Image: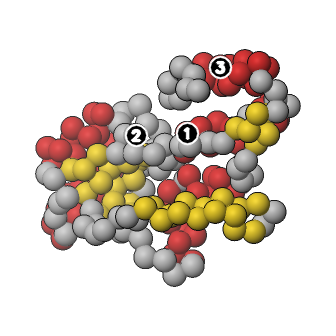
Amino acid sequence: DRLPAPDTRHSAAFLAWLLRQGDAVPGALLYPTSDDVAWLMATNHAALATRFRLFQPEATALQSLLDKSRLYALAERLGIDTPRTFMPAGEEAVREVGRELERHDGYPVIVKPIAGAGSADTHRCDSRADLEKALRLVRHVEEVSVEEFVEAEEFTFDTICANGDLAFENVCL
């Protein structure tokens, strides 16, 4: 059954709702299906663990995946290609990155939060005007990155591990 829940972007309301669900059905398995829910679960692990069986990595491992600057640094250390990415501090620095990319590589670019929540607040910018529009739309976001746009086929690879062993894997094309 699907239960109507508060919007996950309203973390306090969503957490209160989760705790009520855990009180109603103690011992249920709670599995995050988005970045924002995974982070909420990691940062509230102690309260949730008294009500649910939890299935997710520790907060430090999760932070390395959700924080784009840490994820890209890890990918680079492992030799995994990533888009050229800039972590400008503030709106004017984003504009400067946009001007620099326009002079050398051109558009499109992607503007998105450094701390991920799926594709929320992710914007493709095909021009300086688009970049300005994206900046207005992400003002509520603490830090954003600007990435080169890469045209390629996209794959999603999901896994579930139990006791350190691969229990399930799935590739979506």
Q: Quadrant of residue 160?
A: bottom right
For marks 2 and 1, the one nearer the N-term is 1
For marks 1 and 3, the one nearer the N-term is 3
Helix, strand or loop status at disc 3 = helix
As drawn, 63 above or below 40: below
Seen in the image, is 66 located left or right of residue 150?
Answer: right
Does any portion of residue 43 appear in the rendered image? Answer: no
Q: Residue at x 57, y 22 (%)?
A: 3
**Mark 2 = which residue?**
120
Q: Decide which of 96, 44 is in the foreground and name it.
A: 44
Disc 2 residue type (three-letter) = Ala
Identity of the residue furthest to the front in this view: 1
Q: Percent from the top left, x then y, of residue 119?
A: 40, 45
Q: CA distance from mark 1 to mark 3?
A: 15 Å
Q: CA distance from mark 2 to mark 1?
A: 10 Å
Q: Check if mark 2's residue and mark 1's residue have beta carbons within 8 Å.
A: yes
Identity of the residue furthest to the bottom in this view: 79
